[in-house]
Structure formats: structure tokens, C-alpha cells
Image (tube, coloured by chain):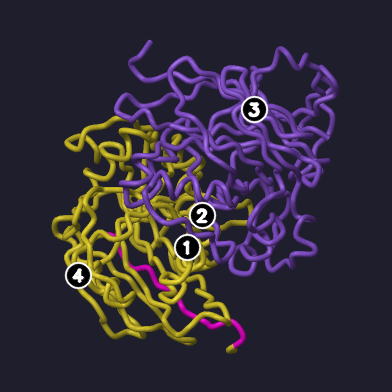
Chain colours: A purple, B yellow
Amino acid sequence: MRWVRFATGNGAVYGIVEGDAVQEVEGDPFAGYQPAGRRHKLADIRFLIPVVPGTFYAAGLNYREHVIAVADKLGVAPKLPKAADIGYRANNSLIAHGDTIVIPADATERVQYEGEVVAVIGRKTRNIGAADALSCVLGYTIGNDLSERSWQGEDNTLWRAKNTDTFAPMGPWIETEFDIARARTRVRVNGKETIDFATADMVFDIPTYISRISRYVTLYPGDVIWMGTDGSGPNLKHGDVVEIDITGIGTLRNPIVREGAA
Amino acid sequence: MRWVRFATGNGAVYGIVEGDAVQEVEGDPFAGYQPAGRRHKLADIRFLIPVVPGTFYAAGLNYREHVIAVADKLGVAPKLPKAADIGYRANNSLIAHGDTIVIPADATERVQYEGEVVAVIGRKTRNIGAADALSCVLGYTIGNDLSERSWQGEDNTLWRAKNTDTFAPMGPWIETEFDIARARTRVRVNGKETIDFATADMVFDIPTYISRISRYVTLYPGDVIWMGTDGSGPNLKHGDVVEIDITGIGTLRNPIVREGAA
């Protein structure tokens, strides 16, 4: 099942994607819903982020080639994480499928995508074992963890390197039937594929993260966990379009502008 | 004006503290309110966190003696921050005035308080100068940034060192008339004062943080910015009570238990 969140004259609503149509519902996939009796063309809706998270978690370095690539860019030795220590991103940075990524005027040219699978928590969870951990996941969506590499290297935190407004596109929807073992993550810039990796090829997998987090931290419905990315990407510039495609979920597409460049 | 949030049979509501009474309102201090016509004894209410933040910001190292003390504990050289680079905490860790701090069973004995003044954002703000920055602040509250120092030193992130459930008491209310220049932050453990410092003695002040954040990041009503702490504190143990007092705001008081110790 595909849960999409979109804008109407009455505010944000959820719907279920059925082919090229969307069945609007009253309520939401977390607390419960019923059909609203309204049907929309998928092509006509204005996408919103599929959920406003209570907490926005991010695994950070979680694929081998990416760890090596980032270390190389920062001029330090690569170091694989020893444990599934989660990090955080901020809601201000979230934008929906189709929305425009805005690179600040004073950013360097080193702004790069990171294509990530995102687990969306469906129910309140504390102290869950890895074997059962996926039972608290409602479904999966796609994230683009935009990163300004000079700020990532220089600042004390990742606050503007990764949390600048519009730097976290998420969507287009939440897919509940995702099979990560068969999935590949592919990124295209202006239609040209720039990377292709096995989505499941993580240092620590999703059950490991959820189990470890939930030992100390309560997960809530609507929390999202971005699982990291592999490899590295080219610098993105004004006028580019980035698409992140994950098998079985769909495609997250966002155009890019640079502030003051239009 | 003092804004308190508390639990009723109809859910969470806001009220205005007037001496030993609370005037309940309909609405909230961010979007607007009107008197509900119900009055409560302050002593009778069950406090809730004064706001559920959209984003929970934390300045981290922002007082000189604390920078030196933390570096000493971690066995590294002290390094004052070069810029007002903000960090993040997570909503799961928030508890209200009076709620119990729970130290996980496997935490070391090195769990310590950090008494902090907290700025609560009142309106949507982007690109504000330092001279005007305080105009977007609704008021101030108190935070206790509990920290497990061994996890802080060993983990890749601060996720469990500072974001374990119950590790972020915040309250008791939002004071809109706070004069930081005259304020002192005092912490008491079991009634005995353990630290006393000038609340305003920060490396980077609140206007500097807000101005810098808002250059890249939109601040929203209800966002909170925890401003860091000075000095260092003793290890806290099962049965202790921590009180953080900031002149002109009030006192945030929380008892402590250790999981499995009762």
C-alpha cells in the first residue's frame, strides 16, 4: 500500500495511491482512517512530505564506500562506525517530492546529494529486539540528504551542512510492502545515472538500528530514520534536477536553484 | 507573563500563572488564545513540558568553564567554539517539571546535570539580524541537559549520552519578561547548592545564535534553543533530587531513579 500526503483546500490530507489515482482518506495511517469518498488524479495532487516527524533520525555513515569517500573529501582516514549510533536532522530542512532545493548564495560548489532509504515508524516502541524490530515500521520512503561538504568539514556540527532549509527532500510516499533485499538505489542527475547500489548493503541494517535505539529511546509513530547512502556524487548546480529511485518504492525528484542565480 | 502547560481531563491546555493560581485559556501563546473561564490552584496542576518543539536545538559547549571541564573529563584539550554552530536534541528525551529522570541500568555512575536557559521561539523567522533577534522569542524556560559522560566520550554521536528517555527535563513554564543580564543559574542537589553562575556569561549569546541559525534555517513557533551550561556537576544517583533555578524564571525540579534500583 502506498500512503501519500498532499495539499487540498482543507489542508493536508492522506490518500492511498491506486495506479494513477489517489483515494483520499479521513485520518491517517498511524492513528486510523476511513475513506473520505473523494478520488484524485495522482498527476494533479500537490505532494507534501509524507509525514511531519516528531524526531528525524539519520544513520549518517552507514555504507562502506561512502565512509571512504567522505573521509577522502575531508582529508582524514576512513573509519567504519563501531556501533549503530544514530544522529539527528531537523524538520525545517524537509521538503516534498517536486519541491525546489535552494542552495544558499554563500555555499561553495561542493553541494552533493545522498540518496537514502527511510524507515517510517508506525507505532510506539521501546526495547524491541532486532528479530522483531521491523514490526514497528509502517513503511518506507526516500530521502535526499543534501550536504555542503565545506561546511560539513569546518563547522562544529552538521547544522547548516545538512539542515539548511530545503536540504532534506523526502517522499514521494510511504510504501508499506517494500522488500529491501531486492532493492537498488539509483540516482540520476538531469536524467543521467550517477550511482547504483544495493539498498541493503549497509554496515548496520535497519533492525540493528531500531533495536539499539529503542534500548534507550522511545520511538513514536511518524518518527523517521534515514539510513545513509553509499558512494559519492558530483557537485550539483543551479538548474540541475536530481532523481533518487529505489526499487519498489518509487522516485523522489527535485529541481535545484542557487539563491540569487535566477 | 508566565505560560504554563498542564494536563486536564480534556487533554493538554495552556494557562497563565497568576500568583498561586492558573487561568486556563483556550488556544495557545503561539497562535492566539482567549480565557477559558476556568481557574486552577497552581499547586494542583500536573505540569507538562511547556511546548512540544518542532525542532529542539542545543548550543552545546557555550560557557568557558564548562568547555574546560568537559575536555578534562574526556581527556582532550579544551577548545572554545569558533562560531555559533547549533546542535540538536530529540523530543523523546523531554519530561516536565516534577517528572522522574530514569537512569538506564547499564549507565555508568557518571550521569550529570547541565542547567540551561532555554529560548522559546514565538514566530516564524528567517534571516534576522542580531539586533532584532530577540523579537522572535516568546519567552524563556529552564532545561536540564542530563549527560552520561562515558557514552558522550565513546559513542559517535550524543544520541544516548544526552537523548535517552527522560534525560531532558524542561519547564516549569515560559516566562516572557526575563532579564538575562540580571539572572544567575543555580543548581541544587538534594537541597545543597552545587553551582552558581551568571546566566548571560556565554561564549555566543542568544541573539548571535538566532541570527546565525536564521541565515540558513527557518525558525518556527515552538522551536526551543537550549543555550548550554557552565562548570561541571557531581554524579547523580538513585534518590537524588535536582533543582535548577534561574533568576526571574523559576525552579525546575526533578527526582532521579536508577532503572532496577528501586
Q: Which residue is mark 1?
A: B156
Q: Residues within 10 Å of mark 3 (few under 14, many from 20)?
A: many
Query: Whole-Å distance between the Cαs marked 1 and 2?
Result: 9 Å
- Looking at the rendering, which quadrant does residue B154 occupy? bottom left
Q: Nearer the viewer, residue A193 or A37?
A: A193
Name the residue at 59% across, 43% down.
Answer: A229
Instruction: Give the label, 1 or 2, closer to the camera.
Output: 1
Q: Which residue is mark 4?
A: B65
Residue A105 position (above or below residue A51): above
Is residue B259 covered in magenta?
A: yes
Point out which mark residue A29 bears.
Answer: none
- Chain containing the residue with disc 3: A
Q: In what element is the residue under mark 2?
A: strand
Question: Where residue A134 sits in the image (x, y, percent)?
Answer: 77, 55
Q: Residues within 10 Å of mark 1 (few under 14, many from 20)?
A: some
Question: Where residue A178 sits in the image (x, y, percent)?
Answer: 80, 41
Q: Residues within 10 Å of mark 2 (few under 14, many from 20)?
A: many
Look at the image and give the residue range highlighted in magenta: B249-260
Label 1 with label 2: CB-CB less than 8 Å: yes
